[in-house]
């Protein structure tokens, strides 16, 4: 692997630190008890980073997102909604409700504004509170309270950050996605190339500090494909009745951010 590719993320790391350090220190100065809450500090840092990175990242992912997100139908749960950039790709003629799962509350105002700008009525938007993807019971409780069931789950570059990912994803799909519903994802994943994978593992401990837990070395697409559910007879069965995984056109193989795009249909039994 070329050294320029192996060290390609340093400019992003430097930019993230340059953008987010001062606002984070200011927040700690205003509220010193934050130092006892590392998760809150990480979210303040990430909110500042993502306010600068989200636009260009969205621009770079426009083509694969256009092949994916318009497949969302019904009530759509956007897992790790960020600043709501996925909203712009939803086909409003087939999407009935937009539900944002975003544990970083500093991003909620932007999500609401983007949904409004895209023409969603207030009553068709739900921003879940006080939970992350790892809390399916809390998610279900809020959905039930709003009388919603999830027809489509969408994740754009979020499965890289959630804790205990294999368990979390399985429980989320089992408990929250309706039978016959769709899981759509666009994620950077562990490369099949051993040399690229080595560098992804090398960088992950540092990268995850700056990007709120984001890991470069997760084979998310393989975990999702292997996901199991309990069948009607109590036996384990594959979670999906159909699935399709594709790549980002023109992406170099040496890329540390090697993307997979996935469209999975949950079984209906
Ligand atoms: C790289 S950003 C992507 C945001 C958005 N999907 C986009 O495409 O712009 C990852 C997002 O995942 C969120 N996140 C982190 N941990 C999470 C968790 N446990 N459950 C749900 N979302 C989480 C972060 O707050 C962040 O907004």
Image (cartoon, rainbow, N blue to C red):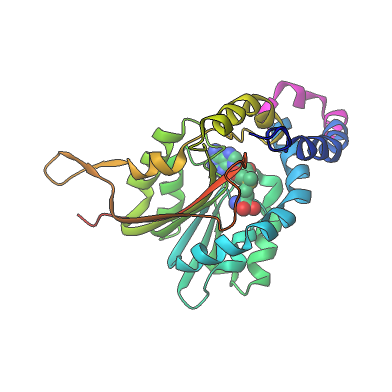
Residue projecting furthest to the bottom: 93
Could you tell me what secondary structure mostly forms the magenta stretch?
A: helix
Q: Residue at x 39, y 43 (%)?
A: 224
Q: Quadrant of residue 45?
A: top right
Q: Quadrant of ligand 1?
A: top right
Q: Position of residue 266 (x, y in %)?
A: 31, 54
Q: Quadrant of residue 229?
A: top left
Q: Residue at x 53, y 75 (%)?
A: 92
12 part of magenta stretch: no
Q: Position of residue 213 (x, y in %)?
A: 62, 32
Residue 106 relative to residue 233: left or right: right
Q: Which residues are magenta?
A: 27-39
- In the picture, the quarter occupied by the C terminus is bottom left
Q: Residue at x 82, y 40 (%)?
A: 15
**Front residue (pair 95, 222):** 222
Residue projecting furthest to the front: 2
**Front residue (pair 175, 85):** 85
Image label count: 0
Residue projecting furthest to the left: 233
Position of residue 87 relative to residue 215, above or below, is below
Q: Can residue 98 be seen at all in this image of the molecule?
A: yes
Q: Quadrant of residue 83?
A: bottom right
Q: Position of residue 98 (x, y in %)?
A: 52, 63
Residue projecting furthest to the top: 36
Q: Residue at x 11, y 43 (%)?
A: 233
Q: Position of residue 249 (x, y in %)?
A: 56, 58
Position of residue 232 relative to residue 243, above or below, is above
Residue 136 relative to residue 63: left or right: left
């Amino acid at each position: 692997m070329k050294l320029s590719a192996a060290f390609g993320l340093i400019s992003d790391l430097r930019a993230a630190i340059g953008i987010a350090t001062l606002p984070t220190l200011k927040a700690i100065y205003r509220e010193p008890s934050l130092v006892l809450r590392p998760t809150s500090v990480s979210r303040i840092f990430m909110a500042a980073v993502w306010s600068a990175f989200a636009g260009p990242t969205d621009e770079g992912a426009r083509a694969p997102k256009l092949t994916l997100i318009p497949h969302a139908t019904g009530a759509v749960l956007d897992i790790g909604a960020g600043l709501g950039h996925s909203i712009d790709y939803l086909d409003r003629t087939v999407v009935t409700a937009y539900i944002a799962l975003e544990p970083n509350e500093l991003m909620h105002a932007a999500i609401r504004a983007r949904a409004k700008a895209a023409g969603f009525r207030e009553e068709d938007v739900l921003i879940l509170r006080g939970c992350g993807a790892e809390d399916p019971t809390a998610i279900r409780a809020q959905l039930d309270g709003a009388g919603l069931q999830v027809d489509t789950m969408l994740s754009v570059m979020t499965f890289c950050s959630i804790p205990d990912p294999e368990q979390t994803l399985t429980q989320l799909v089992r408990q929250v996605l309706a039978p016959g519903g769709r899981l759509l994802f666009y994620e950077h994943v562990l490369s099949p190339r051993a040399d690229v994978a080595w560098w992804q593992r090398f960088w992950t401990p540092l990268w995850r500090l700056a990007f709120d837990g984001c890991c470069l070395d997760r084979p998310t697409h393989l975990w999702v494909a292997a996901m199991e559910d309990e069948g009607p007879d109590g036996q384990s069965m594959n979670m999906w009745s159909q699935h399709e995984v594709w790549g980002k056109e023109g992406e170099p193989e040496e890329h540390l951010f090697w993307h997979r795009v996935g469209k999975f249909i949950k079984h209906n039994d």
